[in-house]
Image (tube, grey):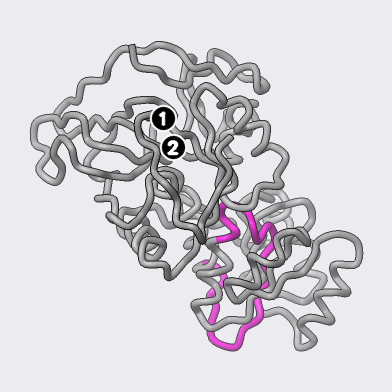
Amino acid sequence: MPKAVQLSAYGGIEQLKSVDVAKLEPKAGEVVVRVIAAGTNPGEISIREGFLKDMYPMAFPFGQGADFAGRVDSVGAGVTGFAPGDDVLGWSEERSAQAEYVLSSEARLIAKPPALDWYRAGSLQVVATTAVAAVRAVSLKPGDTVAVSGAAGGVGSLAVQLAQRTGAHVIGIASEESAPFLRSVGVEPLAYGDGLAERLRATAPRGLAAFIDLFGGGYIDLAVSLGVAPQRINTIIDFAGAQKAGTKTDGSGAATSRETLAFVANAIAWGDIVMPLTAIYPLAMIRDAYTELARRKAHGKIVLALDPTVKEPLRPTQSSSLA
């Protein structure tokens, strides 16, 4: 029987279990995809632990994961844009992408660009739409200086590049280990930690025009203290801080569309944007994948490989570890 990740209760890493499920059958307008790769995202940890149960109420047991890529297995009546065998990527509104088969509507799928590898395709939708929304929210223009916290994570690594494409000067706040990557994409790295405010003032003596917070933990207060206008501060995580300061909170939902996904997918496929991967885990090691994700030290995405028959080599400039 097909395997799928299911949770039977809120809790810790022990709740992540791969179980046997019935084979999916599409209804009218639906598409069943044989999943090759699926993404992991920090928000899934919060959902699993019950911190977002008011925002995302779920009935147990429920699955996990939004991003996926794979091949169309079957289609329901009325589906005209895809056929069995097509290579696709997309997202699951039911949060059930971490499974060997996923059910999707035609409206949540796009064709996978041939040059885009399966692992990036399968972990793209959440970070792509979140990065686009976060950058769009602060209205960057040529000559602006913007700081981005969490600049080398899954969302941050894309957001800094999208921000840089606006003509803005981008300062990426991350670990010292991430500095070479940030420099390679035209971003000025700045280490987080004690004395950050002084380093930002020295790096941007004319001040910051905008601030994108992708990490939380007080960055909104920092941005405000540096004189950034609240309407040009956006956070995807510190909602309490945003409410207090009157800043924006645009995330994935503000930019979720097939058009946004296709734009970023093609940009990566053509090499206009680099999407780093930290590691690729088989489904049987899902607890290891989320243990690594929870450390918040990943440089890029942590991906689940669902189909062991697909062993696609990565381009030499985009290598990753296979856990």
Q: Please say whether residue 193 is one of the residues in the magenta stretch.
A: no
Quadrant including the N terminus = top left
How many numbered tags mark residues here?
2
Start and end of the magenta stretch?
137-157
Q: Is residue 203 left or right of residue 143?
A: right
Q: Residues within 10 Å of mark 1 (few under 14, many from 20)?
A: many
Q: Find residue 258 and name its label.
A: none
| Nearest the eye: 91 or 56 | 91
Taking the image as shown, residue 132 lies to the left or right of residue 228, namely left
* Residue 302 image position (x, y, % from top left): 56, 42
Tell me where residue 196 sits by quadrant.
Answer: bottom right
Judge whether residue 138 is colored magenta.
Answer: yes
Return the residue at label 2.
38
Q: Quadrant of residue 91?
A: top left
The answer to whether the residue labelled 1 contacts the one labelled 2, judged by CB atoms less than 8 Å apart, is: yes
Pinpoint residue 310: horizontal percent, then vertical percent. 36, 35
Name the residue located 21 percent from the left edge and 30 percent from the top edge. Answer: 73
In the figure, is residue 210 to the left or right of 111? right
The residue type indicated by label 2 comes to Ala
Query: Residue 93: x and y, percent?
Result: 38, 36
Above or below residue 316? Residue 110 is: above
Q: Residue at x 65, y 73 (%)?
A: 183
Residue 240 in percent (x, y) is at 71, 49
The quadrant the C terminus occupies is top right
Q: Which residue sits at x=79%, y=81%?
A: 203
Neighbour tally class for label 2: few under 14, some 14-19, many 20 plus, Cα within 10 Å: many
The residue drawn where x is 75% and y is 68% is 223
- Front position in the image: 276 or 141: 276
Q: Which is nearer the N-term, disc 1 or disc 2? A: 2
Q: Label 1 is placed on what type of residue?
A: Leu
Q: Which mark is residue 306?
A: 1
Q: In what element is the residue under mark 2?
A: strand
